[in-house]
Structure formats: C-alpha cells, structure tokens
Image: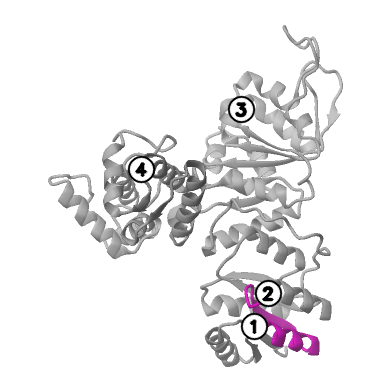
Amino acid sequence: MKKPRILVIDDDESITSAISAFLTAHGYEITAANDGDEALEEIRAGGYAVIVSDIYIDRVSGLDILRAARERNPEAAVILMTARGSVRTTVEAEMGGAFEYLAKPFEMRVLLAAVERARTAHAAHAPEPGEDAAEYGNIVGFAPPMVEVYKKIARAARSDETVLIAGETGTGKELAARAIHEHSARSAKPFIAVDSGAIPGTLWESELFGSVRGAFTGADRDRPGIVETARGGTVFLDEVGEIPPEFQAKLLRFLQEKEFRPVGSGSPRKADVRIIAATNRALEAMVRDNRFREDLFYRLNVLRIDIPPLRERASDIPLLLRRFAAEAAEATGRRIWFEPDAERFLTEYAWPGNVRQLENLVRRLAALGPGGPVSRDDLRLEQQQQQPDETIGQEPAGLDEIERRQILRVLAQTGGNKTRAAEILGIQRRTLYKKLERMERERSGHTGVPETQE
C-alpha cells in the first residue's frame, strides 16, 4: 500500500522538524507548515490523506484545521496534538471527526502507530458538528492520562449507553459524570446525583422509583422518585457498590426494560433517563465474592472510564494549586500562592486523598493563614496543626504523616521493591530514596520500613 502524503502543522519549528524527520525516515512524504494560514493554503490545495496538527497554532486553531480538512476531503485523517488538553477541545475534536488526539509530550512511536492506523483505516463517520460545546471548566489537567479521560468523556457524551466511572476517592468521578451529561443531548434536562451509601436498604425502591398515595402509612400523596424527577436527563449513582443486594435485581430489571413501578402502583411506567454509575471499589472482586450481581456489573460496565489518581498525573498539581488558590481567594478575599519549594514538595507527594485532599489543603491554608506566599515551612506547620489520627475521607491528616503511611503501605504491597513502589507512587526512585532517608532521620529507631529490593 502506497504511503500517503502527510501535512505536519505546529507553530514550533523544532517540533515540525523532528516529526518530519522521523516520519520521512519511515518512508512518508512530509510537508511542514509553521503558521495557520500556510496550513490552510496547503489543505485547500489538497492531496493530504493524513494531517498532523497542534491544537494551538496562532489565530488559526487545530480545530479550524480539522474543519477545513474534513470539508476538503471527508476521508482525511486528522491527528491533533496538544499540551493543553481540555474537555471542550476534546469534545469538539471528537464531534468534528478527529482521527486521533495525542497529549504532548508523546513518544514518536505513538505518533507513528496513529499514522499507520490512519493509513489503513477509513476516517470515522462522525455526526455533523452542532453548536460549540459549552466549556466545562471544573475538570482540570493536561497530563496524558487526563487527555485519555477527556477522550472517553467525549465519546460517552455522544452515546446514550450506561457508563461506569471507576477511581479512588477524591479523583473527581462526579465531575466526569457531569461533563458527560453537559456535553450530551440530555444537557438541558436534570442531572441528579445519588449517594448510594446514604440511602437505607429498605428505602431504595421508593427513593428511586417513587410511591403512590396509600402505598404505606403516612403516604398521603403521590411522591415522584429520582427517576421521575430526572425524566429526560441523567441519574448518577455514586458509589454503586453500596447498593444493597436485595435491590440490585430491581435495578438490573430497570436498566434492561427501561421501565419502573412506583411503590404501591399496579402498573409500570416508562423511564427516559440515562444511568451513569461510579465506584471506588473493585466491583469485579465483589462479583467474585457474591456481594455484587455479575449481570448487573456487566449491564453497568457498557462504557467505562477509569479516573487516574493524582499521583499518576503529578504534572497537573501546579495547575490545580493555581485553580484552587484562585477559588479560595474569591471565597475568602485572601490570596495565597506557593513558593517553588512548597510546590515541589506538593508535586512529589503521593496524595492518597487525591484532588479532594489537595483542594482541602489549599482551602484551609487560605482560610486560616495570613495570605501571601506559602513556603515548605508553612506546610510543616500545617502538618503539626493536624491531628495525627485523621483519615482519608475527613479533612486530611498532616502531609508528612499521610505520605509516610502511603509509602509504607505501597512498599508492603510490593514486597519492599523500591522500583515498583516508586512507579505506583508516581515518583522517581531517587525521590523515594530521599523520602525514606528523611523518614529514618525524623523517626530514629522506627522499624516500619520493610526490607527492600531493587
């Protein structure tokens, strides 16, 4: 199969040169453009089956390139690159028919794999772009794992299938669910979040499906349930693993038949709602232990989005710090910012409580501190003021203490293998060594660090 001509577009000439040299070495004919107008002229001239473009060029964006390329040749495969991915740009790229969306920095072999797929595959037949998707700014992050999340959110928004969002506590599962809803055809209808752990087992049926007058003592009127209230919209079942076994069969039937029966009613009603579920538990293990129905798990797990823990996207922490500091300043009138030593420490920290823990820290520093710069010493003082027995899910304990617990826990899980532990913690191995040395100095005589392997 003859290799197609490729147009490479980026305002950074070093990037277009590197990509051009790499793809040329693999037998492709490459044309490079370093400004938007030049790129549009090349596209209008035609002849490019594959286009590789940055999202942010100049006044012409990668999305403009995508539209122009698809108008010129609907079968053109457009691969977009960005160091600043967002829900909005990802949704627009998906809706516009982008072939692939890569987060910078990426390995050249990843780009080559995308180009090879584009070479042999037909361009996806995406629906015609509608109005620009409203920006949903509460999900923050440019790290490659988050760009993958954005891609899955965008694809889920174009579907009406059930979605299962998995991730540790505090990673932002509800934000992902809201993003799916707000970029879907149901966005004008209600989004109702349900805390599955807060509903007693005996009340699930009436809470979700409602009840009619006379159904039980005190039922003096019809009461719509969550499904009825959310008609046309989305119901988000947070921590779905907490749903009691006695209700799981009824939830499965509801998902399969798209109808429900209010408590006390003699006839079923149709339900026009989408279900998005979330869990911080290993539902697969619960299925094996007969604590969660296997058929319900598969019915929920049609589309799946795994939200990475903060330790796996540490490069987003400085951005999150600025976002939370700005929000705290608006709420308290007290502006704070983080000095390089403090930001460096927070970036290297394991964050067992994830984004929620980081947000709580920033809020507390803004509310209780004098404002101004936050140093590493300020964070040490913050540690001393926290109760040592606080746990995740409450306000976070002292930073060093939580980090120590997390490091010891991961080392125990890996049998003392420092290399593997550093990978799980999302830090470099030499950083882990430094932390262990500091722990030994600060806790002389402490024997909790297991014997380790390389």
Query: Which residue corresponds to the image point at 40% horizontal and 46% vertical from the top-left?
Result: 352
Start and end of the magenta stretch?
35-61
Q: Quadrant of the C terminus?
A: bottom left
Q: Are marks 2 and 3 in contact (CB under 8 Å)?
A: no
Q: Are marks 1 and 2 in contact (CB under 8 Å)?
A: yes
Q: CA distance from mark 2 to mark 3?
A: 49 Å
Disc 2 residue type? Gly
Q: In the rendered view, tell whether residue 346 sits above or below residue 225.
A: below
How busy is the neighbourhood of tag 1: few (under 14 within 10 Å), some, or many (20 plus)? many
Badge number at residue 245: 3
Disc 4 versus disc 2: nearer the observer: 4
| Neighbourhood count class around disc 4 (C-alpha, 10 Å): few under 14, some 14–19, many 20 upward | some
Please tell me whether mark 1 sits on a helix, a strand or a loop: strand
Q: Toward the viewer: 246 or 42?
A: 42
Residue ID at (60%, 31%): 196
Q: Is residue 208 magenta?
A: no
Marks 4 and 3, the one that precedes in the sequence: 3
Q: Mark 4 sits on what residue? A: 369
Label 2: which residue? 62
Residue at the image point whose x is 72% and y is 28% from the top:
250
